[in-house]
Image (tube, rainbow, N blue to C red):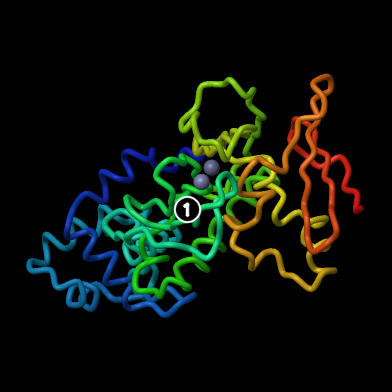
Amino acid sequence: MTDDSDGLRPDDAFTLLADRTRIKIIRALGDASTPGVPETLTFSELRRRADIAGSGRFNYHLKQLLGQFVEETDDGYRLSYPGVRVYQAMKAGTFTERVRIEPFELDADCHVCGAPQVAGYRDSMFRVRCGADDCDAVFYKYFCPPSSLAEREREGVLRAANEHIQREIASMATGVCPWCCGRMRARVLPPDAEMPQRDNPAIRNRVLHTCETCDGSLYTRLGGLLVRHPAVVSFFHDHAVDVTRRHVWTLPFAASDERTRVTGTDPWRATVRVDCGDDTLRIRLDDEPSVVEATRE
Ligand SMILES: [Zn+2]
Ligand SMILES: [Zn+2]
């Protein structure tokens, strides 16, 4: 691992942003830009657009941002790459917006008891669980930025959440952190391991993914890691189905452990059964977990 000595520690970076004037400067530069092209503004134009009274105050706060979130060029000032990311997070409402979608019933059944599934969104978490009062099955509980779900029809909410979940978990499945691109390690946990949601009947064989760089971590099922594996995508494709467009919570092999069986402990092996039409694809996994074999029946 290399250390960029010019970089700021995360807490310093956040401290730097804890000021309304600086946020207004970043917002003005971002608003002035067209997608893909950071706009460069002169000192006076930037001050006018950021609507900041007092040249001295403006100058002081602009200087604080220089080198980290704002770059100075011969023509003026523009957002640096981290500045663009801060602007995007502000626009997406990632750190500020509170969006809530009350639970609504889905056209999909609980993989444990057969009752209808329900989806909802609160505290930045998209959830799909069983709608029955006496069933504790949770199929997905996943962080989604508020802007990805606000102001969409239900169908759009589901499509956005599905794409987001599938894409991020596919990235983890290849060992790349979806949040920072750092290296992710995965570990199959023993069934009796301490973990959140121990009593969820839709998950028994959990995989813990942890990023070495940003400390991000997530639990997944074994089957959940396979949705975008080439063997699975091509299996469904041969049946004229684009599995990447199927909502993950409706896929029994991905959303519950009913199709997953541990077949050996030394070496550790598990099989996930994937069905489409009358055909079956059996996927054998080791404890990495990676696919060791895929057989069609
Ligand atoms: Zn249920
Ligand atoms: Zn990471």
Q: Is 294 located above or below residue 69 in the figure? A: above
Q: In which image quadrant can residue 15 be found?
A: top left
| Residue type at the position of mark 1 | Val
Name the element at disc 1.
strand
Count the labels in the image: 1
Nearer to me, 205 or 63: 205
Decide: is 59 above or below 205: below
Who's the residue at 80% across and 64% down the image? Answer: 277
Horizontal side, residue 224 vs residue 239: left or right: left
Left or right: 265 with respect to 14? right
Where residue 77 sits: x, y (%)? 33, 69
Residue 157 appears at what percent x and percent y? Answer: 44, 68
Residue designated by label 1? 128
The location of residue 292, given as percent across then percent down, is 86, 40
Q: Quadrant of the N terminus?
A: top right
Q: Which residue is located at x 39 percent, y 44 percent?
A: 133
Q: Is mark 1 within 8 Å of ligand 1?
A: no
Q: Residue at x 79, y 25 (%)?
A: 268
Find residue 61 and report its image quarter.
Answer: bottom left
Give percent across and percent down for residue 191.
62, 24
Q: Residue at 33% x, 67% y: name it.
A: 91
